[in-house]
């Protein structure tokens, strides 16, 4: 089976969010039109210290931009209107304790450099 060749990136943005990294990449079709890929890359660490990345990717074409944007805005507005913009998940609490019992705060997490720079080759 022939391997699928990814198109070259024209424009790229990266959003790091804890163990997840989101890549927003503009690529060109064979006809030289542009489309967007959104990739979620999530780091998983094994008990032995090794890790791997799990990726999920969506392709978004120009004919769907307006509807996609509208639906995304409606969904995010609904969440904010219903629950506010405060993050209330357990992981984001100031006194969150990892399984080893250590307390981790968002401030100490960012100060210790918990974000890892990765290249596209890593995922």
Image: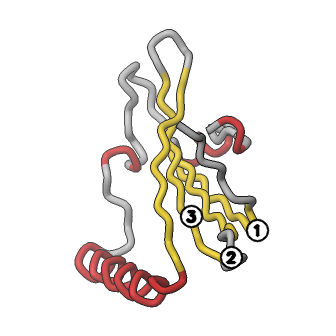
Q: Nearer the viewer, residue 108 or 35?
A: 35
* SS under mark 2: loop
Rendered residue at 29%/75% (across/down): 79
Q: Quadrant of residue 62?
A: bottom right
42 left or right, relative to 76: right
* SS under mark 3: strand
Compared with 98, 123 (above or below) is below
Residue on which disc 2 sits: 31
Residue on which disc 1 sits: 10
Q: Could you say where residue 102 lies in the image, as x and y percent from the top left?
A: 45, 25
- Mark 2 closeness class: few <14, some 14–19, many ≥20 residues within 10 Å: few
4 left or right, relative to 13: left
Q: Could you say where residue 56 lies in the image, as x and y percent from the top left?
A: 45, 49
Rendered residue at 41%/81% (across/down): 68
Q: Could you say where residue 4 lies in the image, as x and y percent from the top left?
A: 59, 47
Q: Nearer the viewer, residue 69 or 75?
A: 69
Q: Quadrant of residue 122?
A: top right
Tell me the CA gap for discs 2 and 1: 14 Å
Residue on which disc 3 sits: 37
- Mark 3 closeness class: few <14, some 14–19, many ≥20 residues within 10 Å: some
**Mark closest to the chain's N terminus, 1 or 3:** 1
**Mark closest to the chain's N terminus, 3 or 2:** 2
Q: Nearer the viewer, residue 65 or 95?
A: 65
């Amino acid at each position: 089976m022939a391997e699928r060749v990814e198109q070259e990136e024209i424009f790229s943005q990266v959003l790091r969010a804890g163990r997840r990294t989101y890549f927003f990449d503009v690529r060109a079709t064979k006809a030289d039109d542009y489309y967007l890929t959104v990739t979620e890359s999530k780091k998983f660490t094994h008990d032995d210290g090794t890790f791997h990345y799990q990726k999920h990717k969506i392709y978004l074409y120009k004919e769907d931009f307006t509807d996609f944007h509208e639906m995304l805005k409606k969904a995010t507005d609904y969440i904010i209107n219903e629950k506010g913009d405060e993050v209330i998940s357990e992981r984001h609490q100031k006194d969150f304790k990892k399984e080893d019992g250590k307390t981790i705060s968002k401030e100490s997490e960012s100060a210790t450099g918990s974000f890892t720079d990765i290249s596209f080759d890593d995922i």
